[in-house]
Image (cartoon, grey):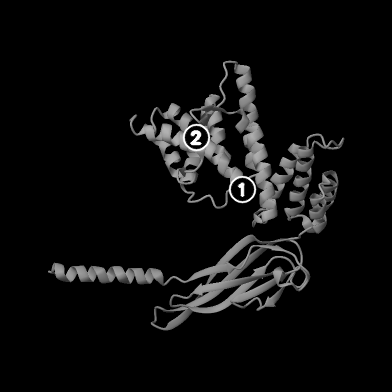
């Protein structure tokens, strides 16, 4: 019979051995220097992306590295360093578009067959990234027209670019198209061919967001504009229709059912529009859920909360949220927390979402008013 002194070391050794065996699985990583390129003069280093194949052999032997890049070699892009079989490559891009990248590594490991002979068996690991690199253009002409505030001309010239095949996957012309429409709206410029420039700006921005695979909107000049546009939509479509109580926002209320339906309908339309022009539609979803619950559309409200509360809990920071996204999320949490208490008759879900975002909004006046006057007092109500 084994003694305890012997069993524990044996079990520990088996545990370590199992971990070692598990750790011996090879791994493959693809690392890149950047994801968005704005084309410069031909031959410029600004047109280049470095990509690395990082293979962890874990006791195996690497046999082959293979890169595959969409488009046509030497026409759309070329190797500035390395080739299809190098571990480190540098690609110089020549044409605008979205490029997919595939990295494959073949490796071998030895094993004994039934007769006891040692033989090698090959395996493959791969990393496939669709639309991995976005190559865009400054479009200096459109930049200058926008700087000159010639918004009708900007709409017309940007419209010419969006139909050019070489820009079919580039969000940039649609960004300038949206800027033109939004400028017309802000300056109240009329054109018989453009019935509602603000709605056209929403449509163009939504198309640009959809095409923006890798963060063209993160370029400062575009991100600043997007934030201003989103803020206009959020404030005029939603915020000014809300009421205030104890220093924080509450949903609009009116004994006139037709007026209630009208205002809530307008806010829901604004929520839908905002979601289409944001990389973070969750930002406005909590506003939508609160409105729908107040309208007795309980099924839809519950579905949104069921989906978005877990999504919210998985968010660790707001680094990729615009300032407008943060405003929308803060307002949505305040409104949803109020409605969740009405639904649940307890504060569990309301407290969960409010506490999760508390550190993000600790300096916002309306959130502080809500949190201190309502959320903190919830502890004494249960």
Residue 279, numbered label? 1
Give 13 or 187, whichever is nearer the viewer.
187
Q: Is residue 121 visible?
A: no
Q: Quadrant of the C terminus?
A: top left
**Is residue 26 toward the left or the right of residue 170 in the image?**
left
Q: Residues within 10 Å of mark 2 (few under 14, many from 20)?
A: many
- Viewer-side label of 2, 1: 2
**Is residue 77 toward the left or the right of residue 272 in the image?**
right
Q: Residue at x 42, y 41 (%)?
A: 355
Q: Indicate which disc, 2 or 1, sits on the residue closer to the N terminus.
A: 1
Which residue was labeled with disc 2?
Answer: 334
Q: Is residue 166 visible?
A: yes
Q: Quadrant of the N terminus?
A: bottom left
Residue 328, numbered label? none
Q: Residue at x 44, y 36 (%)?
A: 371
Extreme-bottom residue of the structure? 117
Q: Position of residue 301 (x, y in %)?
A: 52, 32
Extreme-top residue of the structure? 256
Q: Position of residue 142 (x, y in %)?
A: 81, 53
Q: Residue at x 60, y 76 (%)?
A: 88
**Whether residue 206 is situated above or below residue 375 in the rendered picture:** below
């Amino acid at each position: 019979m084994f003694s305890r002194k012997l069993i524990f070391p044996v079990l520990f050794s088996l545990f370590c051995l199992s971990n070692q065996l598990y750790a011996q699985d090879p791994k493959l990583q693809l690392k890149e220097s950047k994801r968005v390129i704005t084309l410069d003069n031909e031959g410029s280093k600004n047109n280049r992306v470095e990509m690395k194949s990082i293979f962890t052999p874990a006791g195996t032997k690497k046999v082959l590295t293979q890169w595959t890049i969409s488009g046509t070699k030497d026409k759309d892009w070329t190797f500035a360093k390395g080739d299809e079989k190098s571990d480190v490559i540098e690609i110089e891009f020549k044409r605008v578009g979205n490029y997919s990248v595939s990295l494959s590594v073949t490796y071998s490991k030895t094993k004994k067959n039934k007769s006891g002979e040692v033989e090698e068996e090959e395996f493959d690991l791969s990393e496939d990234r669709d639309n991995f690199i976005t190559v865009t253009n400054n479009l200096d002409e459109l930049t200058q027209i926008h700087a000159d505030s010639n918004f009708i001309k900007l709409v017309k010239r940007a419209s010419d670019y969006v139909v050019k095949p070489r820009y079919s996957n580039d969000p940039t012309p649609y960004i300038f198209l949206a800027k033109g429409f939004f400028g017309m709206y802000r300056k109240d410029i009329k054109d018989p061919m453009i019935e509602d420039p603000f709605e056209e700006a929403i449509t163009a921005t939504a198309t640009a967001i959809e095409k923006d695979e890798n963060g063209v909107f993160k370029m400062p000049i575009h991100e600043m504009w997007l934030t201003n546009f989103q803020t206009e939509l959020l404030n005029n479509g939603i915020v000014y229709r809300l009421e205030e109580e104890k220093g924080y926002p509450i949903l609009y209320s009116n004994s006139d059912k037709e007026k209630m339906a009208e205002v809530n309908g307008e806010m829901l339309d604004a929520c839908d529009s905002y979601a289409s022009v944001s990389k973070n539609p969750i930002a406005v979803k909590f506003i939508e859920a609160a409105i729908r619950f107040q309208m007795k559309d309980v099924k839809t409200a519950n579905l949104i909360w069921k989906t978005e509360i877990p999504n919210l809990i998985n968010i660790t920071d707001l680094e990729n949220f615009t300032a407008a996204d943060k405003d929308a999320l803060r307002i949505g949490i305040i409104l949803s927390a109020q409605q969740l208490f009405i639904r649940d008759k307890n504060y569990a879900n309301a407290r969960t979402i409010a506490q999760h975002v508390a550190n993000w909004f600790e300096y916002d006046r309306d959130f502080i008013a809500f949190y201190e006057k309502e959320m903190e007092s919830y502890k004494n109500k249960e």
